[in-house]
Amino acid sequence: KNEVEQSPQNLTAQEGEFITINCSYSVGISALHWLQQHPGGGIVSLFMLSSGKKKHGRLIATINIQEKHSSLHITASHPRDSAVYICAVGGSQGNLIFGKGTKLSVKP
Amino acid sequence: DAGVIQSPRHEVTEMGQEVTLRCKPISGHNSLFWYRQTMMRGLELLIYFNNNVPIDDSGMPEDRFSAKMPNASFSTLKIQPSEPRDSAVYFCASSMGQGQTQYFGPGTRLLVL
């Protein structure tokens, strides 16, 4: 069993839809990261959180430490949100363990 | 700031050749990470440094891989000899400290024929 599980693996949505990507982990962590990988391959860190909720524009990330679960939400999705979203959990030393990613495609 | 800089961006080589990947972290960042991404295995941590010292190299596949960080502004990942299964995208990332947000370089796409 992978230490970091994401679902769904692939997601297709219509522009404007509300999107949720889930991440469950089985190891102790100091922080959870959400990353976005563009079709061109570049990786951008979206959020780093260890409790509660964070919001940046149309993106919201939540984490439940007790349940070892995090969600990434995208409101009013847009085709430019099409990317692979990767959940990663970090240990106290800073090293990351990655999920397999969720490939999101938003159709106009 | 220019962000994390990696070179080369693309590398095509033949099996058995030595490959050296380079990374310049963001100035002032104390932690540096090398990752590898393949279709089969996704992103994997190879090695990371804090203050130029290797902390955990358990992700390095085998002795053919080595990494150095001679100073705070430069790191190399070397593969010698290279094999076709080493073909992947290699990312370098840096952060201000342990457990801080990591900033990724554009990656080096390596193809070993």
Image: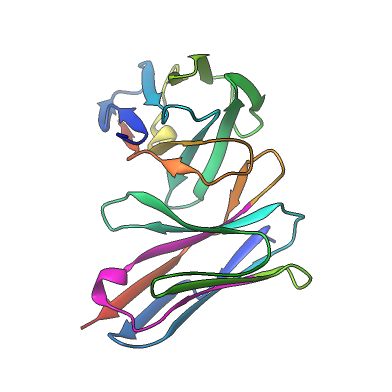
Q: Is residue A102 above or below residue B35?
A: below
Left/right of residue B16 with respect to residue B61 in the rendered view: left
Q: Is residue B18 above or below residue B91?
A: above
Number of disc labels: 0
Is B13 one of the magenta-colored residues? Answer: no
Q: Position of residue A35 (x, y in %)?
A: 46, 57
Q: Can residue B110 be seen at all in this image of the molecule?
A: yes
x and y, in percent, of residue B52 in the image: 57, 19
Magenta span contains residue A86 = yes
Q: How is the image coloured?
A: rainbow
Instruction: From the top left corner, tell me how far across and down residue B68 is, in percent.
Output: 52, 16
Q: Is residue B61 visible?
A: no
Secondary structure, magenta segment, majority class: strand
Rendered residue at 63%/43% (across/down) = B99
Q: In the image, what residue occupies the spot 40% across and 82% down?
A: A75
Q: From which residue to which does the magenta span run?
A: A70-89
Residue projecting furthest to the top: B70
Q: In percent of the image, x 50 and y 48: which residue is there?
A: B43
Displayed quadrant of residue A99: bottom right
Residue at the (31%, 70%) spot, across then down = A81
Front position in the image: A39 or B18: A39
| The image quarter in which residue B58 lies | top right
Task: In this rendered view, identify the residue nearer to me: A18 or B78.
Answer: A18
Residue A46 vertical placement versus A9 (above, below) = above
Q: Residue furthest left?
A: A108
The quadrant the N terminus of chain B occupies is: top left
* B95 relative to B88 in the view: left or right: right
Quadrant containing the C terminus of chain B in the rendered view: top left
